[in-house]
Amino acid sequence: MKIKVQVLGDTLSIEGVKELSAANANSFRDQVRGALAERSKNIDVDLSQTIFLDSCGLGALISLHKTACTRNGTVRLLNPTAPVEQILELTRLHRVFEIVKK
Amino acid sequence: MSESPGKSSRGVALRLSLACDLTEVRPAILAVRGFLAEQGLAAKDLTKCELALAEACNNAINHAADGAKSKAIEIEVICNAAKVELRVNDHTPGFDWPQRVQLPDSESERGRGLYLIQSLMDSSLYFRGAGENSLWMCKNRPSQTGSLTLPPANLEELDRRLAESEQIISDMAEELSSCYESLSAIFRFSAEQGKSIGLENFSRRLLSDLLRITAADWFVLRLVPKEQSRLVVFTASEPGLDLEPLEVPHSAGLARPVEVRAALNRQDIWFDQQKALEGDDPLQRAKPDSLGLVHPFYFGDTLIGALTVGKTISRVPFSAAQTNVVHTFADFLAIQIVNARFQEERVNNLLVARDLQIAKNIQRSLLMKTVPQLPGFGLAGYCESARQVGGDFYDAVKLSDHALLLIIADVMGKGIPAAMFAAILRSLLRALPELTNQPSELLSRVNRLLFDELSEVDMFITAQLVYVDIRKRRLITASAGHCPLLLAVRGDAEVKMLSPEGMPLGILPDTPFTDETAELPRNCRVLLYTDGLTEARNARGDLFGQERLLEWLKETTTRPRKAEELKDELAAELAKFQANTSLKDDQTFLIMAE
């Protein structure tokens, strides 16, 4: 999958996630983990272009959340689209992730 | 993937099959979505069907044994005006379909598929057969308005879009208003902070606003007091929530109050009917069966506190927007608390510095610029203050051309109070001239006068008084728990130590003191000192000690020296011994030499 990954200070910023599903969740997770710099703590995932997210996609985000926690950081989900936000609320994962809307 | 649209007796149907491969799922689902959109399914329901179907297919593929991977998975979609039916057939060993699926632990990376299907669909059934399983899902469509005669499709579509737009607008309005409320509350409180209302008041009012905005019923704000590892209730929505402090241990355990767990894990913890609080959790006892969340907050790595917000009446969990408001308020509050603490510390430091300056000034005023001398006898005093000013002082009162009263004292305590007591003691001793040749009586009198004040502040004073009469060549000394007086005579094997009995001043209201009399032989040296001398330590941590002091004093009797020279010598000895260390206590001595 093609995503844009940027290191900004102690934050790894990910943009351009169109779909996060069973087909690509593992590769997404591995790609993000591979891009973590030594000082990366937080992971920002921009979900403003995400039109589809399934339970495997959620699994990948949770796994990144755990990675961030071991580095004393957090995963922030930026501007999720309405359907994605509904799924986060439905599975109560808005309690785990910080959801930021700008 | 292959598809075949058709007309079923129950509505319009689409059938397609896909290979047992996760990458096949998404294109198949998109085809179904396109088909359902053509049937005029509302966007909201399209999204739900899309996700439920994806979960069903992923499940089928993930449960397929290696041998079954060659067999296709079939999707069947039937759509009519009342409902959408989705069916997924697979050739896997299948699995047990639970009656009601629970959400897994929030840390779990798996196990949400079936939950999503059950939540998104109105009904679902799973048929497990030999070599073939079938998952059936159904989504009801909103009932058509009006009669059985369908209005023109485009009008119906317009109505639906209008209803959807209304929903979106009302959702946005709700979110906007909660954002607006939180922002205006924060601005209001930022302005009030300038008016220096107490932090507690401020927090309570801010959090009362938070309850209103998030439709919650109660809150508890715990803070970690400075240099403590406890979460102490700072303010709460009602007096019943003024709970006992909670110790915060160094590592996380299991059965702990939820607020402590949240603080240790640096994570929000949610509680509700499914994940209820432990029976012995203080919050459970105070607010049984609440739902809510604990949000710990930090300044850097330092735990500042934990905010718990709960609902007892409503069963509606906090939405994402409300959760955001809770976080925003807690973070804002944390900044205010840290700011307030910095301010307090700064003011305290200023006060301490002022206190020290005043105490130093008092102490300096106690020490005489010139020490009275007697014919043939020299007298010299030395007082070096440690950084934290204590209450050491010495004094010498000339009583006649041949008599002196020597005083040395150590007030136990620091800062202004110690310096004040030193000043009072000095004045009292000088105000009772009739008793100067009876040091023990003078001490009892002074003890009675000072006892109440000293014991009230838990302070005491050690002191030594020496009446010196050079015409009679003798001294009379009394001590209130002070170091011994040292008397060294040339040619003597030992330095004499005079230590008459007596308790420090301020311990007992009526306590006896005794006088001890000693002759003053030719070329003797008399040394009065405070324990800051003998308890001085060098860089290695060794004590200066009484032995070293006795040795030095004895050695000086072999050389003719004036009191002033002896003072400089002892000061130099001390300085040499304490090289590269900082003074821990005041060091004071008074030396007399013939």
Image (cartoon, coloured by chain):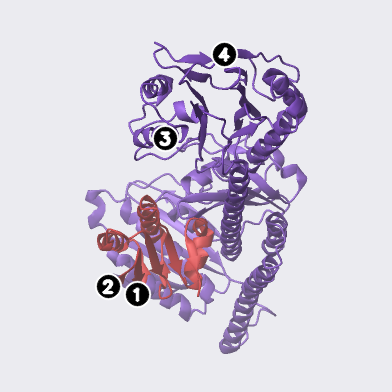
In front here: B414 or B213?
B414
Residue at mark 4: B518
> Which residue lies at the image location 69% right of the left edge and 50% below the top edge?
B235
Residue B13 found in image quarter: bottom left
Q: Could you say which disc has been placed on residue A97 in the image? A: none
Q: Are marks 1 and 2 in contact (CB under 8 Å)?
A: yes
Please tell me whether mark 2 or mark 3 is closer to you in this view: 3
Q: Chain of mark 3?
A: B
| Upstream in sequence: badge 3 or badge 4 | 4
Residue B492 found in image quarter: top left
Residue B214, how many percent across, how many down?
67, 62
Question: Spatial distance from mark 1 to mark 4, Cα to Cα?
Answer: 97 Å
- Horizontal arrangement in the rendering, residue B376 relative to residue B445 (left or right): left
- Horizontal arrangement in the rendering, residue B572 relative to residue B188 (left or right): left
Question: Spatial distance from mark 2 to mark 4, Cα to Cα?
Answer: 100 Å
Q: Amino acid at mark 4?
A: Ala
Residue at mark 3: B565
**Colour given to chain A in the rendered image:** red
Circle 2 residues within 10 Å: few <14, some 14–19, many ≥20: few
> Which residue lies at the image location 42% right of the left edge and 71% below the top edge?
A47
Residue A14, how many percent across, how many down?
34, 69
